[in-house]
Amino acid sequence: PDDQFTDGIYKHDYVLADSSQVLPCYYVQFEVTSEKKKENSGQLCDQCQESEAVVYCQADEVALCYDCDEEHHNRGNKILSKHVRIPISHKPKSYGPCYLHPDHTYEFFCGICQQPVCLMCKMAGSHSSGENATHYLIKMD
């Protein structure tokens, strides 16, 4: 009664009396910062490359100083003025480019495959069809 076989997938329910029987699976994230970067903690503006960035525009994926943000988003452009900008300290972390799709960064982690997955992998690549398409992907924040 506990065994199920559907769509080529075998499932069985187990009862574990001792939690030490469970092998944990971890996704570990850490950052390494050089001493030189710590001294110069301010990120430069992606536009002018001179002033310290104060806001991040997720729509444009750019960090901007106050002057460049004003010029790019507020001076005479109604569409760009609707972009939501957040303080640079709240900028989302980047997990690096996907080795299969270098134009896309990793956004998910597949606990079954034990590998990071980018949006392109999810939509048209390794996790878009077959058994991998059913894997639960964890959003990396």
Image (cartoon, helix red, strand yellow):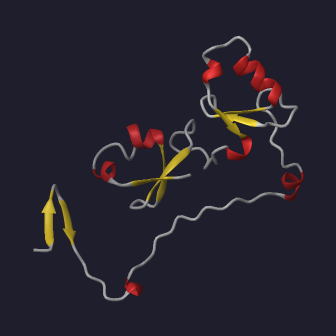
Q: How many labels does the image show?
A: 0
Residue 6 in the image: state x and y as whole percent. Answer: 14, 59
Please give left or right for residue 31 compared with residue 131 in the image: right
Identified at 25% across, 78% down, the residue is 14
Please give left or right for residue 42 compared with residue 100 in the image: right
Residue at far bottom of view: 18
When asked about the image quadrant of residue 61, the answer is top right
When asked about the image quadrant of residue 5, the answer is bottom left
Frontmost residue, 74 versus 97: 74
Residue at far left of view: 1
Identified at 30% across, 51% down, the residue is 134
- Residue 77 in the image: above or below residue 52: above
Residue at far top of view: 76
Frontmost residue, 76 versus 56: 76
Residue 9 in the image: state x and y as whole percent. Answer: 20, 61
- Residue 129 in the image: above or below residue 31: above
Please give left or right for residue 109 compared with residue 28 in the image: left
Please give left or right for residue 122 compared with residue 58 in the image: left
Residue 45 in the image: state x and y as whole percent. Answer: 80, 33
Identified at 42% across, 78% down, the residue is 23
- Quadrant that contains the N terminus: bottom left
When asked about the image quadrant of residue 12, the answer is bottom left
Residue 11 in the image: state x and y as whole percent. Answer: 20, 67
Identified at 52% across, 47% down, the residue is 107
